[in-house]
Amino acid sequence: MGIFGFFKRNTLKAIQWLDDSKNTIVYRFPMDGRSITWGSKLTVRESQVAIFVNKGKLADVFGPGIYHLSTSNLPILTELLSLPFGFKSPFYAEVYFINTKQFTNQKWGTSNPITMRDKDFGTIRIKGYGTYAYKVLDPQVFLNELFGTNSTFSTDDIANYFKSMLVSCISDTIAESKISALDLACNLEEFNQTVKERMAEKFASLGLNLTNFVIENLSFPEQVEKAIDARSSMGVLEDKMDTYVKYQTVHAMRDAAKNPGGNMSSAGVGLGAGMAMGNMMSEMLKSNSSKQDKQEQANTKFCPECGTKIKATAKFCPECGAKVGGARCPKCNQPVRANAKFCPNCGEKLK
């Protein structure tokens, strides 16, 4: 009875893993020096895979289901152990359970800013953060590449490695896109898809499948954000100067109303200052526009045959092929066609 009791205490008849965690990827079944008897029941639940290992070599793989172990369903292990046909004695092997469910809401973020060249602001640094999700695609490859001989393996054990891979890929993607800082925010969806596609092969080499990747936010240094705000404000003022003047007027009147001891003269000062500033900026914009018009006029001329606007240095018209030169209007000095009766620019009657 003592011998039978010893074997009973030191053999396994049921092997299973009840996963009560949310982040365990691999679980090594605790053998505690015990052996496995033929006919033992192996239970593999949904979203699990069981792998038998002998002396560090991967053997047989079992998907979801209930199995009664025998030489017929453990052919690789039987060969590794060099077991004879009909062998019935207990044997020893390690059993690993791999969780194949999707691990979602994994966090990533830039510990150090990403440096990028921007056509508007020069060299700037940005930070970002987001989430990603993955699952085990090939359990055998995953065990060989990442797991090792730990008793358990969780998402925390590999988080830093994945984060460095993802941030490196994001940096390369942004650099190769040559997109401006002003356009980054409106292209996050495209960046998400590009990074996911580029990382797919790297994850597959580890036996994993990157199922989702999201850039939630990209932020700039305070100085760059102020520059972006200033540029946006100038764009609004350039297009809608009258809105700016009205804005200053309303604020001047509101400030006067809040001052019970004041009078409308203070409101007039604020109103006058606002309108003066608006007029000054309006004149500046007009001046810039006038300079641009004069510059454009100096760099262009008209074909004397067909009237097409062409470069001032052109010798032939790109539209009709006529040689540029010849008659000019005696009043405005603009080129005119040889047979023209009136100047197309000022209307002067030509001889």
Image (spheres, rainbow, N blue to C red):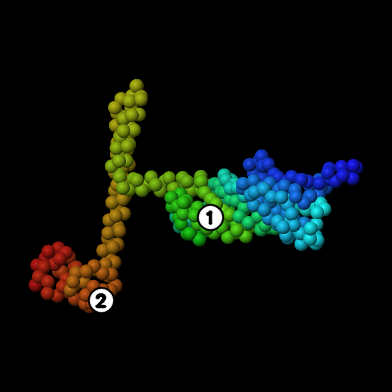
Say above or below: 30 vs 254.
Answer: below
Tell me: 174 left or right of 277.
right
**Residue 271 at x, y = what percent?**
30, 34
- SS for callout 2: loop
In the picture of the structure, the residue carrying the numbered disc 2 is: 316
User: What quarter of the picture does the C terminus occupy?
Assistant: bottom left
Whether residue 328 is visible here, answered yes or no, is no
Outermost residue to the top: 261
- Dot placed on the residue nearer the N-terminal end, 1 or 2: 1
Question: Residue 120 placed where, x, y %?
Answer: 44, 55
What separation in Å lies between label 1 and label 2 (alpha carbons)? 53 Å
The answer to which of 319 and 142 lies nearer the viewer is: 142
Residue 77, image quadrant? bottom right
Residue at the spot 19% in from the left edge and 69% down from the top edge: 307
Return the mark for residue 196.
1
Q: Secondary structure at mark 1?
A: helix
User: In x, y percent, where is residue 108?
Assistant: 58, 48
- Depth order, front residue of 261/156: 156
* Mark 1: few/some/many CA within 10 Å (<14, 14-19, 20+): many
Q: Which image quadrant is residue 198 in? A: bottom right
Viewer-nearest residue: 325 or 307? 307
Q: Up-down: is 81 above or below 111? A: below
Report the side of 143 relative to 319 (left or right): right
**Label 2 CA crowd tier, 10 Å (few <14, some 14–19, many 20+):** some
Q: Are marks 1 and 2 in contact (CB under 8 Å)?
A: no
Number of numbered discs visible in the structure rendering: 2
User: At label 1, which amino acid type do we have?
Assistant: Lys
